[in-house]
Amino acid sequence: MGERKIFVSIFKFIVFIFWLIFQFIAIVLIYNIFNIFFIYYFIFFEIVSAISVIHLNYKDKNTSYKISWIALILLIPVVGVIIYILSRIGIKRNFNKMNKVELDEKIFPEEDKTMLSQLKVNNKTRYNQTRLIKNISGYGVYFNTKAIYFPSGKSMYKKLLEELKKADKFIFLEYFIISRGKMWGEIFEILKQKAQNGVEVRILVDYIGSMFVLPKDFENSLKKYNIKYKIFNPIKMLLNVMLNYRDHRKMAVIDGKVAFTGGMNIGDEYINLYKKYGYWKDMGVCLKGDAVYSFTSMFLRMWQSITKKREDFQKYKFESKFNGYTGIVAPYNSSPEESNDVAQDVYLSIIDSAKNYIYITTPYLVIGYEMILALSLAAKRGVDVRIITPSIPDKKTIQVLTRSHYDKLLDSGVKIYEYTPGFIHGKTLVSDGECAVVGTINMDYRSLYLHFECAVYMYDVSIIDDIYNDFINTMGQCKKIEKEVWEKRCFLKKILESILRMFAPLA
């Protein structure tokens, strides 16, 4: 494997050198035709291109992401360099501010050492995974939190309304999308009433996700009822440097006692009142107990990074009345300013340790070499690997990219299914009847590397059976992708897939 990587690196370097030589020759020819200013112009961009490639190779960790940028820079040096520079300007400065907030307010909850020691003896693999999550995300591992699984957006929404009506201290809502419609209208009515009764209500929404769909006069309506409201990373220029780095998290925290997360945003399509893509299937979880504090902290840290005002975290901490072992629950956050790729690292840890099965649902399957290799090796060593993706996409181009990865996975023995009733938007992973992950993380580059995300890792929790059963029931509504049939698809589609796959990380 090591020799192969060395060979690939040498090959890429040789290709790069030849491409530079080719462009240099082209510049010389152009110079003979035009004038000296033209050659100065191109030499400048050649130098900037080389610097950009070196910077890419040094800074970015994901191989596929590097290759896509390098290909863009080398194929169209002028445009590629400009796009790359615009994508990097200001990122370090903005993320350093957020990271400083994280470090200043990091609160590590006390852990049950006895439970951890027992887990280490009983299941070293799961112990190592909980340590991984704790060490790379900074959030706690809990043993006294009850979890409820929702196999649909409608069932999750019903429970959310129930819990919102019970609030008597605070409500924190953070969503990628809040769109006008019945769902928001019903939630807003509860929020108005609660705010009038003295409950502290805060809403945090992503600018890109909601800019075209927010309810009319949204901000003024919230101010009227003293509801606090912040926008994550509003665009101030046509070419905003943080266009990719979005707050894709979805969470509701109520009184520090209850937390919700999953694929569901606030919009009528998520509860199937609006069916543009057939039946919209979403999934999520509700937590009750000490683990809720991790979501409270995630929200406050994001809020604090926007306002630059310190929050009193302890004020919003609720002491759980649950006693005894209910399984292990470990909420975690993934963000582009982290030194680790938390979202991918957790997935890879579970995939690499799987013995019997790995079942995954994802709306987008736009993954790099590391993830493809992990899934392929798992299938080759006899693990039953199954992935469900949508049959009806919300984005046609992304479906082409998703399907472009089918060949390699099918060749390795991975089983792929497409959900025929409509669009599956849930992001779940369940393995070996022991552990599961539910959250906001898609299996694509943006979620794994470029967005702020959140999820819950669970081990030995009763709802793992619910997640497994939901996957099996959903699979019954899917069309299995047969390798022999898939290989016979149109040749032009294969060409299109290959071209798009080259730039998949930039999509």
Image: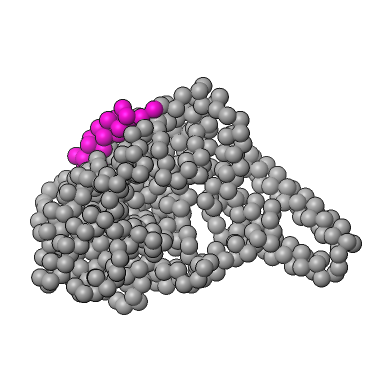
In the displayed structure, would residue 374 be above or below residue 308? above
| Residue in view at x 88 percent, y 61 percent | 33
Of the 4 image quadrants, the one containing the N terminus is: top right
The answer to which of 130 and 465 lies nearer the viewer is 465
221 is within the stretch colored magenta: no
366 left or right, relative to 221: right
Image coordinates of residue 261 in percent, x first then y, are: 27, 52
In the displayed structure, would residue 391 be above or below residue 88? above
59 left or right, relative to 115: right
272 left or right, relative to 360: left
- Residue farthest along the front direction in this orientation: 216
| Residue in view at x 27 percent, y 73 percent | 220
Image coordinates of residue 494 in percent, x first then y, are: 59, 34
466 is within the stretch colored magenta: yes
Image coordinates of residue 255 in percent, x first then y, are: 16, 63
| Residue in view at x 48 percent, y 50 percent | 445
> How many marks overall?
0
Residue 108 visible, this orientation = no
Image: magenta residue range: 457-479
- Residue farthest along the top direction in this orientation: 484
Residue 337 visible, this orientation = yes
| Residue in view at x 58 percent, y 48 percent | 503
In the displayed structure, would residue 437 be above or below residue 112? above
Image coordinates of residue 63 in percent, x first then y, are: 56, 49
- Residue farthest along the bottom direction in this orientation: 309
- Quadrant of the rendered image containing residue 452: bottom left
